[in-house]
């Protein structure tokens, strides 16, 4: 057959319709041809050692004529509800009714979704004992265990940091000095030890008003005497207390004391040594007794008794006239009472509560990291769409986190025993302590789960959750404790504690603090029973209730994410502002909106897209396993209005079909797949998967899907094999077949040598292989692949194509929906292709159908024969002879020739070779005039655009850089341009509508119109008959590529 076609092409002329007649006889609707690409050459050279399965053999695609489609729904138009125009008086009321209706609808939908969820999954006893539930829990539990074994950061944050903080914190409590201090000898050697040479002492101001003062001062030891003479000094504006003190001291001693005080203040900076005591002596009394007044530094606790002992010793030496006599005085502190000892121990226990709360604040932060990280990399969505129920996901997470919480809890209880904290491990307090710790583990885990819905980055979640639990736990407890100690705020504290206890951290801290201070009666309701309501009873009850409440709240937030509530509130607020800002009478707004109001008929819709829409909407999709009906997604905008990502998408996918989505970034491809996989919810319209509505029954619909997201949804600490085992268990593969199924996928995707590598160590291509393998494990009937070959080399890419093609088109097992930016990938894999632009489906059909319908031209590339040496020598000789015709040239040209061959006398054609001649710009212009094509020369010397000819651009740059072009090089360029001109004239005369597409090295490209009046056989035959005449070395003809068609639609967007 192909020999016949070849002969037909050779004998065909431009008016022949023989090829079209053959098409009709053979029943061929359309056909296409292409040339060998560089990628295929690379695969043949680089992949010679690979087996045949690694490459896909290029083959022609034959499409049978499409059957006629019923036009019953051709005039389908969306149903719009038009309300009559409302007066200005009722606009605000109408808007309020609309907002209330939407709010009630949202609340009702939330309640009904939660009730349905609880009815189907929680309240059904058979669900709890089903093998699927426990199988999923087992798989997820193994996942967490394997990740925890390799995740050192989580182990450090969850176990090591709390343990070390507890240990060192309790050790610091034991390092405090013992309260029963040793006795202290009262001596001045402790004063100024550094400034006095290590002996202590210092200056002692001593009043010498009385004669006895001189005698006593000579016997003072432990310092040196600062002699003070009395002076008449009066304090300005003295207070009454000072006046009374002076009068009490007497008329003689009073002024002396004032004088000493003035001296102490005025001589403060005279010495470096500190002064701790000053002495004012009295005169000898009538009965022979001797008295003195001591002024001491009150900043020194033992200054007064020390200086009293110093003066008494000096008086003793004076009385006995023996300088060796002394009085030794020691201070013996009284031992602590039993009440003080208990108070000290209870305060130590309270300090231990503070340490425990700080240490345990790190644990919920580690809970948040694992959950947010899985949602951040889309691993959680991958597990849910693979079959994991929300209940089994959170139940397994809850149990794992509680078990991991038991390790720091056990360590804390052991430390309480080691350090003898009887307030927590005593006979009456041990049970409350255990209950508080265990219930805190349940409550803090579930409350942390609620917080994780507000974060999209695990690092931010870790830090914020740590601070939240620290402030709502320890800080609130300290505030409540202080308010309870103050009489004026005690009543307010009792009221506020009802709200504080909504935080599990506060209940934990308050319960332990109540046990620590139970014997002191410092907490509300000073009872002796540790389980009383005002001691630990309230905390225990609140923690138990919060563990259940926050877990149920987690399930509600899973069903109705916070961002949906936020979007609804923002939309209502914008509507309110819009009403109050636009109060014109011409403005009306409907009270009700139709669910299909956005399904607007696109007048520019392609006929194939319209036929597909009519076929789906009319119900003619009996064999379709996926069909979309007016699927639409709208994202709320902040300042620029709403963003419509997908406009009323309607199409169907048959079993065994590979449907390709093509489109630029932001065209809506990934959004469409996200709605099909359940990651996003449609704003309007719906889709059906095996007859199940993705909006009404998403779990049943997603049970049939295998999903490969755009970015790898992999758990970084699981190996390739562990990933496949996880998803095989999730998809219900029995344990006895698990090994075979996993190894089959590992071998199928050529991942055997990477089977035991963690996913974070894989290359980008191997990560994509693993993601596709996860989507295909369990042989799901529908596989959704979002850019599966991103980051792969050509050999690995072709290998992936073979696997996908074998899955869908060859085995007919699954329907594949594929998005890609590679036109070759779409051509190789997809049986049908849809091109999306701006969220709309612009065309749909098989690759060959799209190329035949939208590719209305063929691409022709011609490479002429190389310039022969004979022609090159002849042209060089001709130019050389004309150049050396000296009388005909101006003086400037002769100067250029002198530079080339040196000297006017030697300028002859015999003694100058062509290689020696460098043509200047003036020479090139004159030569162009001789050769009869000045326009061609002008493009060379004028530095104009040479985008169509790379060789000419290089010559122009050389001329500007070197000032000349060698004659042989110029001659070769001129002859090549002559060949190109001949071919160009032939193409334009033979195919008048042909357009020049530029030069690529030594070849020239054209686009030829392709239609009924010009066939491929015509082009081949015409070129073959004139090939030798035109000097064509080789040529290639190819049909319009998918990339050309895609660029056409993208450019028109």
Image (tube, rainbow, N blue to C red):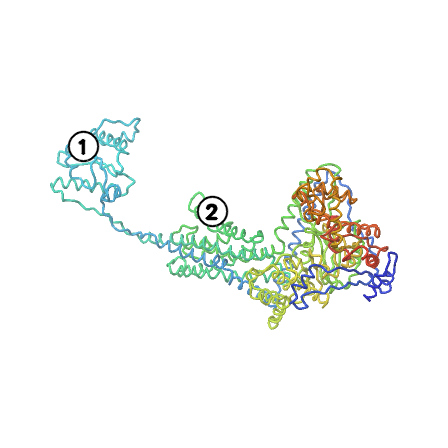
**SS for callout 2:** helix
Horizontal and vertical percent for residue 891?
A: 71, 37
**Which residue corresponds to mark 2?**
493
Q: Is residue 912 left or right of residue 398?
A: right
Q: Is residue 724 left or right of residue 877?
A: left
Observer able to see residue 789? yes
- Mark 1 vs mark 2: in front: 1
Horizontal and vertical percent for residue 754?
A: 58, 65
Q: Nearer the viewer, residue 297 or 150?
A: 150
Q: Quadrant of residue 273?
A: top left
**Which residue corresponds to mark 1?**
208
Horizontal and vertical percent for residue 705?
A: 67, 62
Task: Spot the residue most to the left.
Answer: 321
Q: Mark 1 packing: few (<14 Cα in 10 Å), some, or many (20+)? A: many
Q: Is residue 23 left or right of residue 122?
A: right
Observer able to see residue 545? no
Q: Mark 2 packing: few (<14 Cα in 10 Å), some, or many (20+)? A: many
**SS for callout 1:** loop
Q: Is residue 749 left or right of residue 520?
A: right
Residue that appears at 76% across and 52% down: 871
Horizontal and vertical percent for residue 109?
A: 66, 54
Q: Nearer the viewer, residue 990 or 374?
A: 990
Q: Are marks 1 and 2 in contact (CB under 8 Å)?
A: no
In terms of sequence position, does the residue under pointer 1 or pointer 2 come before the other?
Answer: 1
Q: Quadrant of residue 551?
A: bottom right
What mark, if any, has residue 32 been given in the picture?
none
Query: From the viewer's perspective, is residue 265 above or below residue 658?
Result: above
Q: Nearer the viewer, residue 27 or 794?
A: 794
């Amino acid at each position: 057959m192909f020999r016949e076609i070849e002969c037909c092409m050779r004998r065909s002329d431009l008016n022949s319709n023989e090829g079209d007649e053959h098409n009709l006889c053979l029943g061929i609707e359309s056909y296409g041809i292409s040339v060998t690409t560089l990628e295929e050459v690379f695969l043949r050279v680089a992949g010679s050692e690979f087996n045949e399965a690694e490459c896909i053999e290029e083959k022609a695609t034959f499409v049978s004529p499409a059957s006629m489609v019923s036009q019953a729904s051709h005039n389908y138009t969306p149903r719009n509800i038009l309300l009559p125009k409302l007066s200005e008086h009722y606009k605000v009321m109408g808007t309020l009714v609309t907002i209330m209706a939407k709010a009630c609808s949202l609340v009702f939908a939330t309640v009904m979704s939660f009730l349905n969820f609880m009815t189907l999954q929680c309240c059904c006893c058979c669900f709890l004992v089903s093998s699927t539930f426990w199988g999923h829990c087992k798989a997820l539990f193994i996942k967490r265990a394997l990740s925890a074994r390799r995740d050192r950061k989580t182990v450090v944050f969850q176990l090591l940091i709390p343990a070390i903080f507890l240990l060192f914190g309790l050790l610091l409590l034991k390092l405090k000095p013992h309260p029963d201090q040793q006795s202290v000898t009262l001596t001045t050697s402790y004063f100024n030890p550094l400034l006095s040479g290590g002996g202590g002492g210092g200056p002692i101001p001593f009043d010498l008003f009385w004669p006895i003062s001189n005698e006593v001062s000579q016997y003072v030891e432990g310092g040196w005497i600062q002699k003070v003479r009395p002076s008449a000094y009066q304090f300005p504006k003295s207070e009454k207390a000072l006046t009374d003190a002076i009068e009490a001291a007497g008329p003689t001693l009073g002024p002396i004391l004032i004088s000493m005080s003035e001296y102490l203040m005025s001589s403060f900076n005279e010495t470096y040594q500190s002064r701790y005591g000053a002495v004012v002596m009295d005169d000898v009394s009538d009965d022979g007794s001797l008295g003195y007044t001591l002024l001491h530094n009150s900043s020194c606790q033992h200054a007064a008794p020390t200086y009293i002992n110093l003066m008494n010793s000096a008086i003793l030496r004076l009385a006995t006239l023996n300088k060796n006599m002394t009085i030794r005085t020691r201070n013996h502190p009284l031992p602590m009472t039993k009440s003080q000892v208990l108070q000290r121990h209870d305060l130590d226990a309270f300090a231990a509560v503070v340490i425990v709360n700080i240490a345990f604040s790190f644990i919920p932060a580690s809970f948040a990291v694992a959950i947010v990280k899985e949602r951040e990399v889309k691993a959680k969505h991958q597990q849910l769409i693979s079959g994991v129920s929300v209940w089994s996901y959170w139940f397994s997470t809850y149990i794992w986190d509680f078990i991991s919480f038991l390790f720091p809890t056990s360590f804390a209880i052991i430390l309480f025993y080691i350090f003898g904290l009887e307030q927590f491990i005593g006979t009456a307090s041990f049970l409350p302590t255990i209950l508080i710790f265990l219930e805190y583990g349940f409550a803090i885990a579930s409350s942390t789960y609620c917080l994780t819905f507000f974060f999209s980055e695990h690092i931010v979640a870790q830090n914020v959750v740590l601070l939240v639990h620290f402030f709502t736990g320890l800080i609130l407890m300290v505030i409540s404790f202080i308010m309870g100690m103050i009489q004026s705020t005690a009543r307010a504290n009792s009221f506020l504690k009802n709200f504080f206890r909504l935080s599990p951290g506060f209940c934990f801290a308050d319960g332990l603090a109540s046990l620590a201070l139970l014997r002191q009666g410092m907490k509300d309701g000073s009872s002796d029973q540790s389980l009383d309501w005002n001691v630990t009873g309230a905390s225990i009850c609140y923690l138990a209730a919060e563990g259940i409440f926050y877990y149920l709240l987690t399930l509600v937030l899973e069903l109705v994410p916070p961002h949906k509530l936020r979007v609804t509130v923002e939309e209502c607020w914008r509507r309110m502002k819009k009403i109050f800002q636009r109060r014109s009478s011409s403005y009306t707004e409907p009270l009700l909106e139709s669910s299909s109001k956005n399904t607007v008929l696109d007048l520019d819709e392609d006929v194939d897209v319209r036929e597909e829409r009519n076929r789906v909407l009319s119900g003619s999709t009996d064999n379709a396993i996926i069909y979309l009906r007016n699927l639409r997604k709208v994202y709320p905008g902040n300042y620029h209005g709403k963003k419509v990502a997908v406009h009323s998408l309607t199409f169907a996918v048959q079993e065994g079909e590979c449907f390709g989505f093509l489109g630029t970034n932001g065209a809506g491809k990934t959004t469409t797949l996200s709605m099909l996989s359940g990651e996003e919810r449609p704003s309007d319209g719906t889709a059906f998967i095996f007859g199940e509505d993705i909006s009404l029954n998403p779990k049943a619909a997603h049970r049939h899907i295998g999903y490969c997201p755009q970015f790898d949804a992999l758990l970084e600490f699981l190996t390739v094999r562990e990933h496949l085992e996880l998803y095989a268990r999730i998809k219900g593969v029995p344990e006895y077949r698990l090994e075979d199924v996993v190894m089959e996928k590992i071998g199928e995707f050529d991942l055997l040598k990477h089977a035991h590598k963690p996913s974070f160590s894989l290359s980008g291509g191997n990560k994509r292989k693993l993601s596709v393998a996860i989507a295909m494990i369990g042989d799901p009937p529908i596989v959704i692949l979002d850019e599966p070959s991103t980051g792969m080399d050509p050999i690995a890419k072709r290998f992936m194509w073979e696997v996908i093609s074998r899955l869908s088109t060859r085995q007919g097992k699954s329907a594949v929906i594929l998005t890609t930016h590679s036109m070759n990938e779409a051509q190789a894999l997809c049986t049908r292709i849809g091109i999306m632009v701006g969220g709309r489906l612009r065309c749909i059909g098989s690759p060959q159908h799209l190329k035949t319908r939208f590719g209305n031209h063929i691409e022709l590339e011609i490479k002429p024969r190389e310039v022969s040496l004979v022609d090159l020598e002849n042209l060089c000789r001709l130019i050389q002879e004309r150049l050396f015709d000296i009388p005909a040239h101006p003086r400037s040209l002769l100067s250029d020739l002198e530079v080339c061959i040196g000297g006017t006398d030697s300028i002859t054609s015999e003694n100058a070779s062509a290689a020696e001649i460098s043509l200047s710009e003036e020479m090139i212009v004159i030569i162009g005039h001789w050769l009869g094509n000045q326009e061609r020369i002008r493009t060379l010397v004028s530095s104009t655009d040479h985008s169509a000819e790379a060789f000419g651009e290089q010559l122009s740059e050389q001329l500007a850089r070197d000032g000349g072009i060698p004659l042989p090089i110029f001659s070769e360029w001129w002859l090549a341009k002559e060949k190109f001109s001949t071919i160009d004239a032939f193409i334009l005369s033979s195919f008048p509508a042909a357009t020049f597409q530029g030069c690529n090295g030594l070849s020239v490209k054209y686009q030829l119109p392709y239609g009924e009046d010009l066939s491929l056989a015509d082009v081949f035959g015409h070129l073959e008959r004139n090939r030798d005449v035109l000097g064509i070395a080789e040529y290639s003809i190819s049909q319009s590529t998918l990339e050309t068609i895609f660029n056409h639609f993208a450019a028109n967007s």
